[in-house]
Amino acid sequence: MGNEASCTVRLGNQRSQGKALLETKELIFRGDFRLKIPFSAMKSVDAAKGELRVQGPDGEAIFELGENAAKWRERILHPKSRIEKLGVKRNARVCLLGDFQEEFRSELRACTENVSNQAIANDAEWIFFTASSKKELANVAKHAKEMCGSMALWVVYPKGQKAITALDVLAMGRKSGLKDVKVVGFSPTHTALKFVIPLAAR
């Protein structure tokens, strides 16, 4: 994924192997101990000799990330906006299907005026669809039939819930004839998975 890595982390006298995740606004580590360091709480961020050194509320956490250390430092200090991560270009034609927070709608309006909340138009470039259950997820098959060319469908779903999982979303997209190409942390509570029509089927 690019924002997830198995590594060793040192914090004071503690040392543990585990998984580090670089989210939109925070750095997370899960191992023998756990860390969640919001970007806003970081006092300093440095990278050298394959180590990412983050000075946070609990002291200095050292992430042994190898070549990823410098990349993660850059992403922390100069994070991309959500719209940039999703790949939406200025004046793109976007279709919203489902319940989206006003914050996301405002971000879209700042990027493009071509936003529809109705059926998928033939000239749409980006489709965003929210699903909070397997029942709602079934609509992916319907939306897939309405897609054409290089249209992209982002399925936005809750994190860490049994009612709908990443595997459920992947399975439904693939069953509907689509190809999964990217995953993005949409918000602290939701993940977005991108699907497109396979090149051979366009």
Image (cartoon, rainbow, N blue to C red):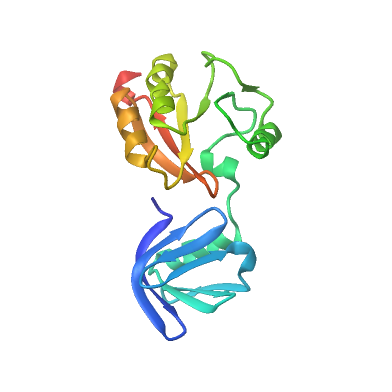
Number of residue marks: 0
Q: Of all residues shown, which one is farthest toward the front?
A: 163
Please provide percent x and percent y for residue 135. Answer: 40, 26
Q: Which residue is drawn at the image coordinates 29% and 25% (left, top)? A: 175
Q: Which residue is drawn at the image coordinates 58% and 16% (left, top)? A: 118
Q: Is residue 38 above or below residue 53?
A: above
Q: Is residue 45 above or below residue 155?
A: below
Q: Which residue is drawn at the image coordinates 30% and 32% (left, top)? A: 171
Please provide percent x and percent y for residue 45. Answer: 56, 71
Asked where in the image residue 119 lies, by quadrant, the reply is top right
Please provide percent x and percent y for residue 13. Answer: 43, 86
Asked where in the image residue 117 lies, by quadrant, the reply is top right
Where does the C terminus fall, quadrant-wise? top left
Q: Is residue 107 above or below residue 117?
A: below
Please provide percent x and percent y for residue 108. Answer: 65, 34
Q: Which residue is drawn at the image coordinates 37% and 20% (left, top)? A: 141
